[in-house]
């Protein structure tokens, strides 16, 4: 048995062997975060089988990530690599550790500014709002991202690794770091990192970023390194206070495909359901399928998700951090016409 495993391992290339190592590390990180969420919850009463779990786990994590990986690496990065090759050899002679560190830091710096831009631009906000739509933020909530946002960010993330002549194993190593760090900053864990939070980002600042509070609409954009927020004046970390309300200040579809349609065409789910029998059928299809499965596999009933009641009915008003841009004119929409909107919503 061990001999066959060893033979299989050595039959893989360097990337395959590295992936074989990073995968169990990722699964271990998931297990650790789940335990910490139960033992030290930031927001008490948040169940594992929360509302939106199926959409986040199945559609965003499994289906979307699988197909977008094929799209990004097979149809974008591979042609770029074939055309340009490792033309620049900028990092080829560096140790792998230095290569990983270089791309982690530079990409995180880019993500800070692109993320900040998305919150300040009406068009690009639509490629990011899905990420803020969950009202129950936990280790899996970070997987919810518009497909165009993933295409843009991962192309800019991995193309330089190939074009600058990095060791191919940098790709799975950096992917592991991204995945674990992304789960960590969204995890429902009551972390108190003290002065370390001035450098390393974690849940205590990023969970505020997902709050429906006016004071954080333009704050805490960092992903891995909180230092960007402190350097550029967008840090927000109140003492002895936690968010009271989460998610978006306006109605947002709960269905994966509906969320992507909404980014291009604003519509009101309730109004459309009243007018269209076809939409009503589609809208209830997932619930009927899950109910059918739950009738045969009782444990699966939890996939429908448990709703957590909102403690606060409306967006929490507050003075926003200094240096915010003037609000942009919002594009009227059926879903948001009667709701209070942040300046970045259109």
Image (tube, helix red, strand yellow):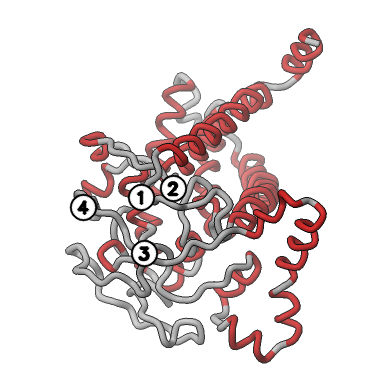
**For the residues marked 4 and 2, what is the alpha-carbon distance in whole angstroms?**
18 Å
Residue 139 position within the rendered picture, expressed as x and y whole percent measured from the top left: 49, 45
Q: Disc 4 marks which residue?
A: 238
Residue 245's disc is 3
Q: Disc 2 marks which residue?
A: 186
Q: Nearer the viewer, mark 3 or mark 2?
A: 3
If the image is split into quadrants, where does the N terminus sit?
A: top right
Q: Disc 1 marks which residue?
A: 206
Residue 93 position within the rendered picture, expressed as x and y whole percent measured from the top left: 47, 20
Q: Is residue 1 above or below residue 196?
A: above
Residue 260 position within the rendered picture, expressed as x and y whole percent measured from the top left: 60, 68
**For the residues marked 2 and 1, what is the alpha-carbon distance in whole angstroms?**
7 Å
Residue 188's disc is none
Q: In front here: 103 or 3? A: 3
Q: Nearer the viewer, mark 4 or mark 1?
A: 4
Is residue 87 visible in this depiction of the protein? no
Identify the residue at image location x=76%, y=83%: 278
In the image, is 80 to the left or to the right of 286? left
Looking at marks 3 and 4 on the same chain, the residue that comes earlier in the sequence is marked by: 4
């Amino acid at each position: 048995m061990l001999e066959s495993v060893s033979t299989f391992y050595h039959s893989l290339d360097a990337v395959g062997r590295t992936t074989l190592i990073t995968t169990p590390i990722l699964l271990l990180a998931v297990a650790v975060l789940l335990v910490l969420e139960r033992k030290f919850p930031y927001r008490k009463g948040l169940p594992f089988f929360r509302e939106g779990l199926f959409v986040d786990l199945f559609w965003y994590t499994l289906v979307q990530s699988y197909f977008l990986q094929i799209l990004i690496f097979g149809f974008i990065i591979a042609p770029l690599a074939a055309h340009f090759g490792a033309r620049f050899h900028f990092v080829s002679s560096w140790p792998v550790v230095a290569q990983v560190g270089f791309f982690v830091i530079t990409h995180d710096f880019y993500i800070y500014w692109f993320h900040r831009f998305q919150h300040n631009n009406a068009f690009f906000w639509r490629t990011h709002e899905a990420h803020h739509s969950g009202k129950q933020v936990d280790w899996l909530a970070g997987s919810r991202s518009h497909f165009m946002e993933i295409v843009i960010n991962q192309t800019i993330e991995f193309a330089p690794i190939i074009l600058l002549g990095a060791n191919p194993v940098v790709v799975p190593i950096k992917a592991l770091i991204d995945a674990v760090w992304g789960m960590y900053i969204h995890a429902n864990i009551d972390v108190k990192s003290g002065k370390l939070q001035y450098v390393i980002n974690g849940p205590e600042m990023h969970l505020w970023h997902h709050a429906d509070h006016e004071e954080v609409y333009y704050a805490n954009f960092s992903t891995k390194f909180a230092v960007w927020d402190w350097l550029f004046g967008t840090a927000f970390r109140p003492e002895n206070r936690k968010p009271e309300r989460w998610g978006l200040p306006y109605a947002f579809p709960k269905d994966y495909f509906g969320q992507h349609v909404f980014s291009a065409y604003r519509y009101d789910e309730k109004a459309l359901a009243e007018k269209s029998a076809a939409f009503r059928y589609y809208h209830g299809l997932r619930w009927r399928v899950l109910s059918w499965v739950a009738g045969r596999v009782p444990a699966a009933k939890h996939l429908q998700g448990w709703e957590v009641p909102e403690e606060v009915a409306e967006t929490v008003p507050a003075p926003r951090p200094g240096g915010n841009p003037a609000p942009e004119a919002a594009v009227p929409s059926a879903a948001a016409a009667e709701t209070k909107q942040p300046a970045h919503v259109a």
